[in-house]
């Protein structure tokens, strides 16, 4: 059975089945595409007229013009090498003087500072508490009359020129200085003699501690 051509297909009044129609159109399209590709390829293979003429034209060699020969060529001068100059002798460099290393300075001997110890201050005696005021006529004079006036209040004579019968003569004192200095136990001869035990003298009735306290407080309170 022969395959129907295009004319037979166009004259055919009966419709093709859908599968046969698609197959025919697919084959037709493939043939058209193949013919188009072949035409493009053959067009690119044909040489262009200008390029073909240039390729087939014979090449004409260029003329080479030579320079005219010189009339009297000068002989070439032989170059004589210049004599080499002997290197100049360098003057001897002056010798450097040896560096003088400075002597190290002697280390200073540290001064020894001898600190003189400060003298210790003698502690001041604590302040004497204020003594109770004692009256001379009422409390002190009776003690002097009973224990001291035998030597320092007798009308026949006063020992050491110290008269203990009145406040005035006591403050005046005798041969060894004032008998009493108000507020000062170290200056008057009366208290010094009582304290060192020379008054009353040996063999005489001694002062009691209470009597000594009265005389002491009297001097410290102002000897009034």
Image: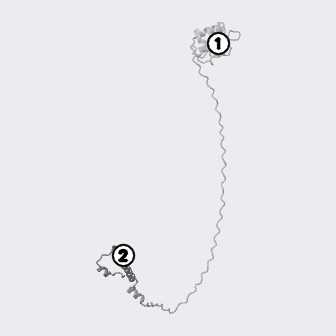
- Distance from disc 1 to disc 2, alpha carbons, whole Å, reads 166 Å
The percent position of residue 65, horizontal first and vertical second, equals: 46, 90
- Report the quarter where the N terminus lies: bottom left
Q: Is residue 138 visible?
A: yes
- Camera-nearest label, 1 or 2: 2
What residue is shown at x 66% (from left), y 14% (from top)?
Answer: 194
The residue at which mark 2 appears reads as 23
Secondary-structure class at tag 1:
helix
The percent position of residue 14, horizontal first and vertical second, equals: 29, 77
What residue is shown at x 42% (from left), y 89% (from top)?
Answer: 56
In-front residue for pair 62/140: 62
Judged left or right of residue 35, residue 206 is: right
Residue 131's image quarter? top right
Structural crowding at the residue carrying mark 1, measured as other residues with C-alpha within 10 Å and reported as few (<14), some (14–19) or many (≥20): few
When the figure is inspected, residue 148 is found, relative to residue 110, above or below; the finding is above
What residue is shown at x 31% (from left), y 81% (from top)?
Answer: 8
Q: Is residue 162 visible?
A: no
In-front residue for pair 58/135: 58
Instruction: Work out which residue is located at the far front of the displayed protein and give it.
Output: 1
The residue at which mark 1 appears reads as 209
């Amino acid at each position: 059975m022969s395959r129907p051509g295009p004319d037979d297909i166009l004259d055919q009044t009966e419709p093709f089945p859908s599968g046969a129609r698609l197959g025919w159109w697919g084959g037709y399209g493939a043939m058209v595409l193949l013919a188009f590709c072949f035409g493009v390829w053959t067009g690119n293979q044909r040489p262009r007229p200008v390029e073909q003429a240039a390729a087939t034209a014979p090449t004409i060699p260029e003329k080479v013009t030579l320079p005219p020969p010189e009339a009297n060529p000068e002989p070439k001068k032989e170059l004589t090498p210049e004599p080499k100059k002997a290197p100049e002798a360098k003057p001897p460099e002056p010798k450097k003087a040896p560096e003088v290393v400075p002597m190290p300075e002697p280390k200073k001997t540290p001064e020894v500072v001898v600190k003189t110890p400060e003298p210790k201050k003698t502690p001041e005696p604590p302040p004497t508490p204020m003594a109770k005021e004692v009256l001379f006529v009422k409390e002190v004079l009776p003690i002097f009359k009973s224990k001291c006036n035998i030597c320092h209040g007798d009308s026949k004579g006063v020992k050491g020129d110290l008269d203990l019968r009145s406040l005035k003569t006591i403050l005046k004192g005798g041969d060894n200085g004032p008998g009493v200095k108000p507020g000062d136990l170290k200056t008057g001869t009366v208290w010094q003699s009582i304290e060192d035990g020379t008054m009353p003298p040996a063999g005489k009735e001694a002062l009691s501690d209470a009597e000594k306290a009265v005389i002491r407080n009297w001097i410290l309170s102002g000897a009034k």
